[in-house]
Amino acid sequence: MKETFDVIVVGGSYAGLSAAMALGRALQKVLIIDGGMPANRFTPYSHNFITHDGRPPVEIASLARKQVAEYVTVKRMEGLLAQVEKEKHEFVVQLDSRQTYYTKKMIFATGIIDQLPDIPGLMDCWGKSVLHCPYCHGYEVRDETTGILGNGDYGFEFSGLISNWTRQLTLFTNGQSTLSPGQAAKIRHRQIPIVEKAIAQLDHHNGSLQRIIFKDGTATFIKALYVRPSFVQQCSIPEVLGCELTEDGYIKVDNSQRTTVHGVYACGDNTTRIRTVANAVAMGTTAGMMVNKELVMEEFEQA
Ligand SMILES: Cc1cc2nc3c(=O)[nH]c(=O)nc-3n(C[C@H](O)[C@H](O)[C@H](O)COP(=O)(O)OP(=O)(O)OC[C@H]3O[C@@H](n4cnc5c(N)ncnc54)[C@H](O)[C@@H]3O)c2cc1C
């Protein structure tokens, strides 16, 4: 039997659950499809989200799922979205299990995949002592011996930002510096050493960084290392549907979280470099409210 929803939300993490809550409260029939791979699954504690500061991400996510489950018009399934086709008035949505559903609108809250530098030991420390964001984890390692793995404009910008949290800072370019002479001079003026030696591996204890070991056999003690990895979209189906991406690779959305394809919305990490739980929740709520408004007004104006 054909099962039709008002909205299918792909991605049931912070952004997707927030969108679903707004829609459930607006009495819309919603299906959440979730692959269960939130970006912060590597970190033991999440910070900078008011009311949940310092709590394990799994606890926040599980409470969110419980609260959303209270809304009887919202259904949640574990699985992966495999394919979507846009027909005249609806989307035909297929899961990897081959189940097919139909929906009037779609919200993609599918996050991104970090492409971490290929340095042995780095992945083990990701989210624990190798960090993506000082607002999420900087306070916990304030004044500690800290490194930045970066080069060029990004290395310069991150050196400036992280110097707010610690004076014991070193920039590791992992090879020849691509900083401009002006950038290098400004970094050195702040007593931040620039180390160009190639990195062999990170020495750690259960994800807690101990040393950076260089290819020349030398090593340096370190407690935290900031990295801003490149990324790819975790789900490429919005692009297949025709959603435009920004130059940086995010799904292009307007202030209402509308993509460039009618009836398709996106929210959370897949649309922004402001990468926090709080922002994902805010964008998800906006997407849910705006999709509801579109559904209600389309119906209202038909008369
Ligand atoms: C290591 C690390 C630590 C972090 N620490 C903090 C912190 O302390 N504080 C903070 O505020 N922020 C932190 N963040 C950022 C925060 O995790 C993200 O901003 C947030 O998870 C974004 O939520 P989201 O819902 O947009 O995406 P995600 O949480 O990444 O969730 C995306 C969901 O979509 C699902 N999905 C993707 N494709 C499909 C598909 N085809 N079918 C079905 N489901 C799909 C995934 O399985 C996943 O469940 C951290 C990030 C990282 C990487």
Image (tube, rainbow, N blue to C red):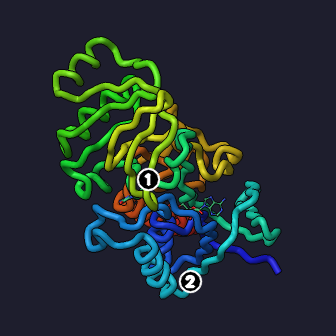
Few, some or many C-alpha atoms within 10 Å of disc 1 (few <14, some 14-19, many ≥20)?
some
| Type of amino acid under label 1 | His
Q: Answer with mark 2 or mark 1, whichever residue precedes in sequence.
A: 2
**Quarter the C terminus occupies:** bottom right
- Asked whether 142 or 50 is in front, the reply is 142
What whole-number distance in Å separates the C-alpha atoms at marks 2 and 1?
Answer: 47 Å
Q: Is residue 27 above or below residue 242?
A: below
Q: Identify which amino acid the numbered label 2 is placed on.
A: Thr
Q: Residue at x 34, y 61 (%)?
A: 278
* Residue marked by disc 2: 73
Question: Would you say 286 lies left or right of 188 here?
Answer: right
Q: Nearer the viewer, residue 231 or 20?
A: 231
Front residue of this view, candidates 264 and 165: 165
Q: Residue 262: percent from the left, percent from the top?
A: 60, 50
Q: Which of the labelled discs sits on residue 204, or is there none? A: 1
**Residue 277, picture quadrant:** bottom left
Q: Which mark is residue 35?
A: none
